[in-house]
């Protein structure tokens, strides 16, 4: 939903939706991973400020992105790569919940590291 009170956010959201609509699956995964990294940084900031409501929303967005990435895996034909990514996404989800419950931004670091490694792998694919 577009926020009429914030034209820049509305523009950014519309631009993102247009990119996602025209993206191939490979580019969509890249976009999701980039968005996840951005949201992880926001969640850490919310934790530092003890902005609990905003933290909860950010963690929820992170979990939704991870679940979206996981749902894109082809478990029947993806072989070991799909199995390993599924395990990594499960680990990240559990770590996010732990970080949120403990309100510990340092607990986000392992998730950032895992997602960074996945991003590096995707960057090497053409």
Image: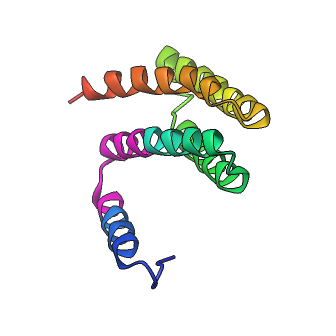
User: Residue 117 in the image: x percent, y percent?
Assistant: 41, 20
**Image color mode:** rainbow
Question: Residue 95: within the magenta?
Answer: no
Give the residue drawn at x 47%, y 27%: 115
> Left or right: where does residue 111 sit relative to residue 32?
right
Q: Residue furthest top?
A: 80
Above or below, comparing residue 111 to residue 10 in the picture? above
User: Residue 26 in the image: x percent, y percent?
Assistant: 32, 40
Give the residue drawn at x 24%, y 23%: 124
SS assignment for the magenta stretch, majority: helix
Q: Which residue lies furthest to the front in this view?
A: 49
* Figure label count: 0
Give the residue drawn at x 68%, y 26%: 95
User: Residue 14 in the image: x percent, y percent?
Assistant: 35, 71
For residue 112, say whether it is visible. yes
Image: magenta residue range: 19-35
For residue 78, say whether it is visible. no
Give the residue drawn at x 79%, y 35%: 101
User: Residue 67 in the image: x percent, y percent?
Assistant: 61, 42
Above or below, comparing residue 84 to residue 46 in the picture? above
Above or below, comparing residue 80 to residue 122 in the picture? above
The residue closer to the viewer here, 15 or 109, is 109
Q: Residue furthest right?
A: 101
């Amino acid at each position: 939903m577009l926020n009429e009170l914030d034209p820049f956010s509305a523009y950014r959201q519309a631009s993102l939706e247009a990119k996602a609509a025209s993206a191939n699956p490979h580019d969509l995964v890249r976009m999701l991973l980039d968005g996840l990294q951005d949201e992880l940084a926001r969640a850490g900031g919310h934790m530092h400020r003890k902005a609990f409501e905003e933290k909860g929303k950010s963690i929820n967005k992170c979990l939704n992105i991870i679940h979206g990435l996981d749902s894109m895996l082809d478990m029947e034909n993806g072989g070991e790569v799909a199995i390993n990514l599924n395990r990594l996404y499960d680990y990240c989800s559990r770590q996010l919940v732990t970080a949120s419950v403990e309100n510990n931004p340092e607990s986000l670091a392992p998730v950032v590291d895992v997602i960074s490694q996945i991003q590096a792998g995707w960057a090497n694919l053409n």
